[in-house]
Amino acid sequence: MTTDTAALEPLVWHKSSYSGNAGGQCVEVSKTCGVVHVRDSKDADGPRVTASDESWANFLNYAARQPA
């Protein structure tokens, strides 16, 4: 039996560079072992979205092509 020690370590969250200090809509992401976790920075204990690296990259590419 093996243990994934990376899963036992606390996640290191990074706030979006588009987030300001005005308390608006903010997103934080954390990447571990080929998985990306996403959460609302105002609700750190709330729900999270988890995606594979590939799915996250596809989402970012899609979002970058959308009009502002």
Image (cartoon, rainbow, N blue to C red):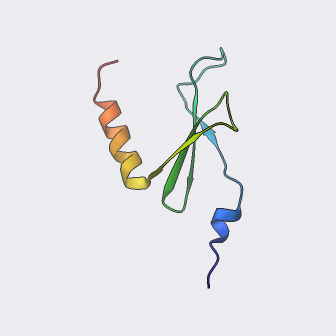
Quadrant in which the C terminus appears: top left
At x 67%, y 27%, the residue is 42
Residue most extreme to the bottom: 1
User: As drawn, is 53 to the left or to the right of 12?
Assistant: left
At x 32%, y 39%, the residue is 61
Q: Position of residue 26 (x, y in %)?
A: 58, 26
- Is residue 26 shown above or below 39? above
Task: Please state which of residues 46 and 57 is positioned toward the viewer in this rendering.
Answer: 46
Residue 22: image quadrant is top right
- Is residue 35 shown above or below 65? below
Task: Please state which of residues 46 and 25 is positioned toward the viewer in this rendering.
Answer: 46
Residue 39: image quadrant is top right
Instruction: Please state the total of marks drawn on the protein image.
Output: 0
Q: Position of residue 18 (x, y in %)?
A: 52, 25
User: As drawn, is 38 to the left or to the right of 64?
Assistant: right
Q: Where is residue 33 in the image (x, y as percent from the top left)?
A: 53, 63
User: As drawn, is 63 to the left or to the right of 7?
Assistant: left
Residue most extreme to the top: 22
Q: Where is residue 15 in the image (x, y as percent from the top left)?
A: 61, 34
At x 60%, y 17%, the residue is 24
Quadrant in which the N terminus appears: bottom right
